[in-house]
Image (spheres, helix red, strand yellow):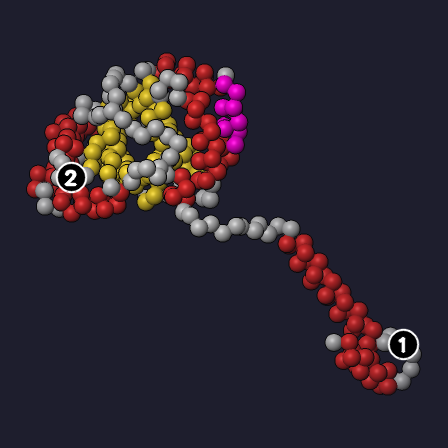
Amino acid sequence: MAPRLCSISVAARRLLGGPGPRAGDVAAAAAARFYSKDNEGSWFRSLFVHKVDPRKDAHSTLLSKKETSNLYKIQFHNVKPEYLDAYNSLTEAVLPKLHLDEDYPCSLVGNWNTWYGEQDQAVHLWRFSGGYPALMDCMNKLKNNKEYLEFRRERSQMLLSRRNQLLLEFSFWNEPQPRMGPNIYELRTYKLKPGTMIEWGNNWARAIKYRQENQEAVGGFFSQIGELYVVHHLWAYKDLQSREETRNAAWRKRGWDENVYYTVPLVRHMESRIMIPLKISPLQ
């Protein structure tokens, strides 16, 4: 670059024929300013570039239980108000048959009606022992199950809407086990900012010990299919007063406040449902 600038400068002086601004100097100065400005900008921008270390493991592998291959499905059914009792009766007549049939690698974990939260809603939680192959096995068998197909047809007339998610369970939570009642259940749902699931898991892996003294921690799950970056925590309490006392007791334990402080900024939206078990629910 420099020799070319010098030749331009000589030619310019010959044409101008006298003293004055030297074109070569002007061009060189402009180039220097451009070079300096460009590099300064690149250096300045580099301060804000977040370098990400490559990962060889998916979040699901890092956070889920290694000793089991369980897959969970949660269903939310919004029922027409006038059909809620009929819906519950129909559900209680059909679903236990799938739960007890050994040919179907699926089992009921819990069945509820929402008490506080979205009204006239049923929530069902299933476990598929064997992961995705077990899920597909059940789906294929249900296509030929005439009683179940009739159940779905009759049920569809009672619903306003329905949605579901496939979930994995956090490695540091209890695996949901049947329990005697009576209990009420709280399903707390957190919709996280994308990319924060690992941070959420790291904090809760330390904090869960503060919420296990009264055996209130039932299960913790994160979504795999459906709406993503969604976490569900399932808790059991004797009643609403017991819930209040148990939650307040956690705040008196050193370390619980740190978990709240570090996880709240990760949340985009959160929701709490208080649920009452149906008669068929293994979680009573």
Dominant SS type (magenta): helix
Front residue (pair 12, 258): 258
Asked if the residue at tag 2 contacts the one at tag 1, i.e. Cβ–Cβ closer than 8 Å, the answer is no
Sequence-first disc among 1 and 2: 1
Question: How far from the left and from the top, in percent, is residue 31?
Answer: 75, 70
In x, y percent, where is residue 167?
A: 32, 39
Which label number is shown at residue 104?
A: 2
At label 1, the amino acid type is Gly
Give the residue displayed 27% in from the left and 26% down from the top.
Answer: 177
126 shown above or below 49: above
Callout 2: helix, strand or loop?
Answer: loop
Residue 58 inside the magenta-drawn segment: no
Task: Note whether 86 is above or below 253 in the view shown.
Answer: below
Is residue 3 visible in the rendered image? The answer is yes
- 255 within the magenta span: yes
Q: What's the mark number on residue 20?
A: 1
Where, by quadrant of the figure, is residue 79 drawn?
top left
Q: Amino acid at mark 2?
A: Tyr
Residue drawn where x is 22% and y is 25% of the image:
282
284 or 22, nearer to the observer = 284
Q: Dot 1: what SS? A: loop
Task: Point out the stretch of residues depicted in magenta.
Answer: 253-262
The front one of 249 and 13 is 249
Mark 1, Cα crowd under 10 Å, few <14 / some 14-19 / many 20+, is: few
| Residue 181, label in figure | none
Q: Quadrant of the N terminus?
A: bottom right
Tell me which corner region of the image, top left, top right, bottom left or bottom right, holds residue 214.
Answer: top left
